[in-house]
Image: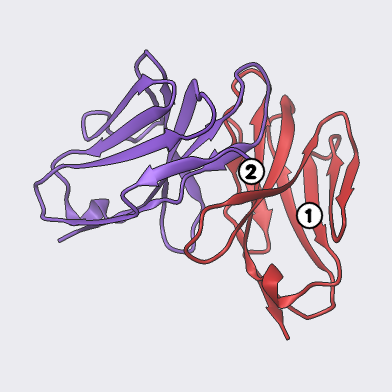
Chain colours: A red, B purple
Amino acid sequence: GENVEQHPSTLSVQEGDSAVIKCTYSDSASNYFPWYKQELGKRPQLIIDIRSNVGEKKDQRIAVTLNKTAKHFSLHITETQPEDSAVYFCAASVGGSYIPTFGRGTSLIVHP
Amino acid sequence: GAVVSQHPSWVICKSGTSVKIECRSLDFQATTMFWYRQFPKQSLMLMATSNEGSKATYEQGVEKDKFLINHASLTLSTLTVTSAHPEDSSFYICSARIGVSMNTEAFFGQGTRLTVV
């Protein structure tokens, strides 16, 4: 089955800096890659997603890139703010099964 | 976005008793719902995929007789932890997708904190 690796497990940045979280996946048939943000005590919520026919997608301060050849995708957050502090999960799902496999999560801490 | 409601948000039960957790899609029909277990500072571990009108599909290592899943309608799936023990204490969270035939966003319930004493 699909295996998703996520790094780093913890990321600490100063407010205003950029943050990058990287994920790799194993199944070349995966075609949907969502990113979820989970604040402490709350449910995960989608912040951005990308499909395999696109190499990059941007939404304000958040962007995601996908390299299908290397089987890795990354989340980029620019001009970080304290409210960006949360755990971020990447996921990959294979067309046909539609069951997402999650990475282990990255705890992002943005210091004011 | 779509809303998934999970109930209860927390429960404390005695060892040996059973606990039922409900997951409802409030404004859409969910043919498929997913049940996850999340340990502190860890990822979402898929336990089973719940399919309306049919048996759930359990992941390897998950005891189907211990974690009973019922998906009796297009808006409700339940997870029953039977004969709960302290090691079953965890955060359980469900999710559901709109649509069947393509990969789409998953909407999560607020989760249930189970503590077995």
Q: Is residue B115 above or below residue B35?
A: below
Label number found at residue B28? none
The extreme top residue here reads B53
The percent position of residue B43, horizontal first and vertical second, equals 51, 53
Pick the front one: A100 or A41: A41
Residue A94 percent location from the top left of the image? 66, 26
Q: Position of residue A73 (x, y in %)?
A: 79, 46
- The amino acid at mark 2 is Val
Helix, strand or loop at mark 2: strand
Q: Residue at x 89, y 34 (%)?
A: A54
Q: Say which amino acid is labelled 1.
A: Leu
Residue assigned mark 1 = A75
**Of pointers 2 and 1, the one earlier in the residue sequence:** 2
Which of B50 and A95 lies nearest the eye of the viewer? B50
Q: Secondary structure at mark 1?
A: strand
CB of mark 2 within 8 Å of CB of mark 1?
Answer: no
The reply to whether label 2 and label 1 mark residues of one chain is yes
Vertical arrangement, residue B102 with respect to residue B83, above or below:
above
Name the residue at 57% across, 63% down. Answer: A39
Q: What label sits on residue A4 in the rendered view? A: 2
